[in-house]
Image (cartoon, rainbow, N blue to C red):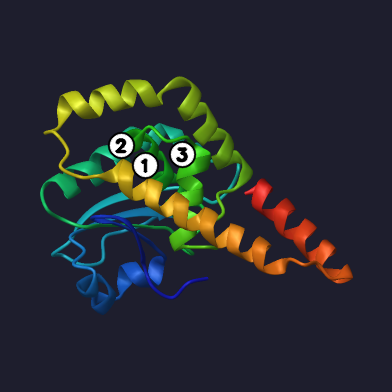
C-alpha cells in the first residue's frame, strides 16, 4: 500500500490510517477535514473536523446509506476553502468507494470512470465487489437526485472537477496505451504478458 495520501482533485485527498494520524502528513497537504471510514473510528486531533463512519471492508457492508452525509461533508469542506482527507485502513476499498461516489456526484462521470481516475493517482485502489455493486446501484437509482440536492443545498461550485477527472482519465489511458505500444513488436512471451495486462485492465 502507499505511504502517503494521494490528491485526487483540488481539496480532496485519499489515504490510509497512518496519513490520518500523522500530523506532518496532514500539515503537508493542509488537511482541515477528515472523513474516517473503518471499524469504530474516532477523532484524533482537536483542530480537525471529523466525520466518522463505522464500516467494515466486507461486501455485505452497506456504504450507500452513508453516501449523502459523506458527499455533503466533503463538498462543504472544499467550498469553504478546506482540504478533506478520506481514509480507511489501507486507503484502498472503503475510502475509495466514498471518493468515487463523491466524484460521480460532482462530475456526471460513471463510477467506472471515476474509479479509473482515482487509480491514476493511487494505483492499488480496489473496492470490494459489494462496494462496486453499491456504486452501480447509486449510479442507477440515486446519483441524479443527489446531484440536484448538492446544487440546491450549496453555493455554486468554483471547482473544475469534470476537467480534472477527465485529465486523470487521459493520463490513465495514456499510460496503458504507452505500455501496449512499447510492447510491439511482440516477442513470443509478450503475448501472455499483454493478455494478462488487458484482462487486469478490463476487470478494474
Q: Nearer the viewer, residue 20 or 38?
A: 20
Determine the CA span between mark 3 and mark 1: 16 Å
Q: Quick check: can you spot residue 86?
A: yes
Q: Is residue 21 above or below residue 145?
A: below
Of helix, strand and loop, which one carries label 1? helix
Asked if marks 1 and 2 touch (Cβ < 8 Å), the reply is: yes
**How far from the left and from the top, in percent, is residue 168?**
41, 54
How many neighbours does mark 1 have within 10 angstroms: few (below 14), some (14-19), or many (20 or more)?
many
Asked if marks 3 and 1 touch (Cβ < 8 Å), the reply is: no
In this picture, residue 185 sits left or right of residue 167: right
**Residue underneath mark 3:** 63
**Residue underneath mark 1:** 103
**Residue underneath mark 2:** 106
Q: Which residue is depicted at the point 11% across and 53% down?
A: 81
Q: Nearer the viewer, residue 176 or 117?
A: 176
Instruction: Indicate which disc, 3 or 2, sits on the residue closer to the N terminus.
Output: 3
Q: Which residue is depicted at the point 63% across and 43% down?
A: 129
**How far from the left and from the top, in percent, is residue 134?**
53, 34
**How far from the left and from the top, in percent, is residue 145?**
33, 20
Determine the CA span between mark 3 and mark 2: 18 Å
**How far from the left and from the top, in percent, is residue 198?**
71, 53
Amino acid at each position: 500500500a502507499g505511504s502517503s495520501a494521494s490528491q485526487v482533485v483540488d481539496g480532496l485527498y485519499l489515504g490510509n490510517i497512518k496519513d490520518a494520524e500523522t500530523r506532518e502528513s496532514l500539515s503537508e497537504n493542509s488537511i482541515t477535514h477528515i472523513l474516517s471510514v473503518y471499524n469504530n473510528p474516532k477523532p484524533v486531533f482537536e483542530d480537525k473536523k471529523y466525520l466518522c463512519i463505522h464500516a467494515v471492508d466486507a461486501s455485505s457492508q452497506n456504504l450507500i446509506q452513508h453516501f449523502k452525509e459523506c458527499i455533503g461533508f466533503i463538498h462543504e469542506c472544499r467550498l469553504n476553502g478546506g482540504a478533506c482527507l478520506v481514509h480507511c485502513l489501507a486507503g484502498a476499498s472503503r475510502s475509495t468507494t466514498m471518493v468515487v461516489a463523491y466524484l460521480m456526484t460532482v462530475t456526471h462521470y460513471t463510477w467506472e470512470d471515476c474509479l479509473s481516475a482515482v487509480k491514476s493517482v493511487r494505483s492499488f485502489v480496489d473496492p470490494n465487489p459489494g462496494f462496486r455493486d453499491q456504486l452501480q446501484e447509486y449510479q442507477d437509482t440515486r446519483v441524479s437526485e443527489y446531484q440536484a440536492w448538492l446544487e440546491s443545498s450549496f453555493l455554486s461550485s468554483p471547482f473544475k472537477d469534470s476537467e480534472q477527472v477527465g485529465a486523470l482519465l487521459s493520463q490513465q489511458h495514456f499510460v496503458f496505451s504507452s505500455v501496449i505500444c512499447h510492447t510491439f513488436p511482440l516477442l513470443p512471451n509478450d503475448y501472455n504478458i499483454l493478455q494478462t495486462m488487458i484482462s487486469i485492465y478490463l476487470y478494474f
